[in-house]
């Protein structure tokens, strides 16, 4: 795909980048998807979205911008959010001209931890160019009890010793954390119930990063999807969001793993992206 990469901000010497994938149609839709990756805030990279889905979106007329953010624990959640707010400002100020867009309107799109960050950005935004929010198996609060307890599913994996985890933490911030190298950080944190302190050591700040029912009711039009059998992020997050967000589409997936769209041999992922495109088309008509 004809992608281009730009640096949108430098955080403590670390260039944070965004990669733009243009629409593959003669008349692009007037919405760009600003994409944030998953990985429990500790691993992953901006281009983890499978090419098959990038192609589907591009062929449907949607441009995609995949965005770096500094990973935890080397960076903490307040700093991560500040960097992403810089990304949105940069897109607003430079994106339309830089990427030759017909419109500066956009939709925040995240998977898992990226969906959490998208919820946070949307709740803090008064930007009239923000037209929608997409959450794939996301969450919007850190007060979920299971986030603070040893996770039964992750404790079926071999135990990761704390001494090994300490060796994985870098002295400098990073925005790319390969799963093979960084997943043990997340695994250990979920096995011990110490995940939240990895990215938010200061307990007094936790409330500021939880969305209330009132804040959910003020969110823009939203597309929600998650698996009913999710063992990582409880499905009730998606159910509750669907009940509270005024303009919402819920696409449940039955009995599959947390990141159900990662398995390209299953139809659930492709069907969900087709539903997403149908929803985006409705938003595009309102935006144009």
Image: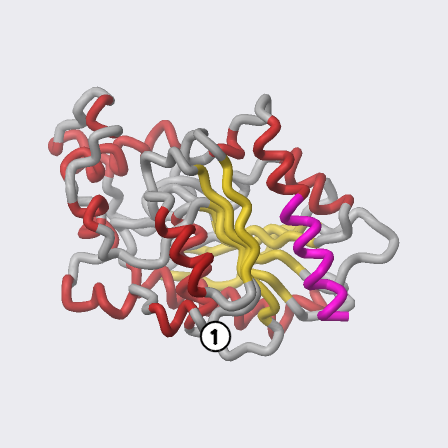
Residue sitting at the far front: 243
Q: In the rendered view of the protein, which quadrant contains the N terminus?
A: top right
Residue sitting at the far right: 26
Secondary structure mostly taken by the magenta-highlighted segment of the chain: helix
Which residue lies at the image location 42% right of the left edge and 51% below the top edge? 238
Image coordinates for residue 196, horizontal then vertical, percent: 22, 51
Number of marks present in the image shown: 1
Q: Is residue 38 above or below residue 179?
A: below
* In the image: residue 182, left or right of residue 35: left
Q: Is residue 66 above or below residue 270?
A: below
* In the image: residue 38, left or right of residue 201: right
- Mark 1 Cα shell of 10 Å, populated few (<14), some (14-19), many (≥20): some
Residue position marked by numbered label 1 in the rendering: 125
Which residue lies at the image location 54% right of the left edge and 42% below the top edge? 47
Which residue lies at the image location 55% right of the left edge and 77% below the top edge? 127
Mark 1: which secondary structure? Answer: loop
**Which one is in front, 257 or 16?**
257
Image coordinates for residue 160, horizontal then vertical, percent: 18, 27
The verdict on residue 201 being magenta is no
Residue 92 lies in quadrant: bottom right
Image coordinates for residue 168, horizontal then vertical, percent: 24, 36
- Is residue 83 among the parts visible in the rendering? no
**Which one is in front, 113 or 160?**
113
The magenta segment = 275-288
- Is residue 222 among the parts visible in the rendering? yes
Q: Is residue 251 above or below residue 133?
A: above
* In the image: residue 245, left or right of residue 31: left
Image coordinates for residue 206, horizontal then vertical, percent: 22, 64
**Which one is in front, 92 or 4?**
92
The verdict on residue 286 being magenta is yes
């Amino acid at each position: 795909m004809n992608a281009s990469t730009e640096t949108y901000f430098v955080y403590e010497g670390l260039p944070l980048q965004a990669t733009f994938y243009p629409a593959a149609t003669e008349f692009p839709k007037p919405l760009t998807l600003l994409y944030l990756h998953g990985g429990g805030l500790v691993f992953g990279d901006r281009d983890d979205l499978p090419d098959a889905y990038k192609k589907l979106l591009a062929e449907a007329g949607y441009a995609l911008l995949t965005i770096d953010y500094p990973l935890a624990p080397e960076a903490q959640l307040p700093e991560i959010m500040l960097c992403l707010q810089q990304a949105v400002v940069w897109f607003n100020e430079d994106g339309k001209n830089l990427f030759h867009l017909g419109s500066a309107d956009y939709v925040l799109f995240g998977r898992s931890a990226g969906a959490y960050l998208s919820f946070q950005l949307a709740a803090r935004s008064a930007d009239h160019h923000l037209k929608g929010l997409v959450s794939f198996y996301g969450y919007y609060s850190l007060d979920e009890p299971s986030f603070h307890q040893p996770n039964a599913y992750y404790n079926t994996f071999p135990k990761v010793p704390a001494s090994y985890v300490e060796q994985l933490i870098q002295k400098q911030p990073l925005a790319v954390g390969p799963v093979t190298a960084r997943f043990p950080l997340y695994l250990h944190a979920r096995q011990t119930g110490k995940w939240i302190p990895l990215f938010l050591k200061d307990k007094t700040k936790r409330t500021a990063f939880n969305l209330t029912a009132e804040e959910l009711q003020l969110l823009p039009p939203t597309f929600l999807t998650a698996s009913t059998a999710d063992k990582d992020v409880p499905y009730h997050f998606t159910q509750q969001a669907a009940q509270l967000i005024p303009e919402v589409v819920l696409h449940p997936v039955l009995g599959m793993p947390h990141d159900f769209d990662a398995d390209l041999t299953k139809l659930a992922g492709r069907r969900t992206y087709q539903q997403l495109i149908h929803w985006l088309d409705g938003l595009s008509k309102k935006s144009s």
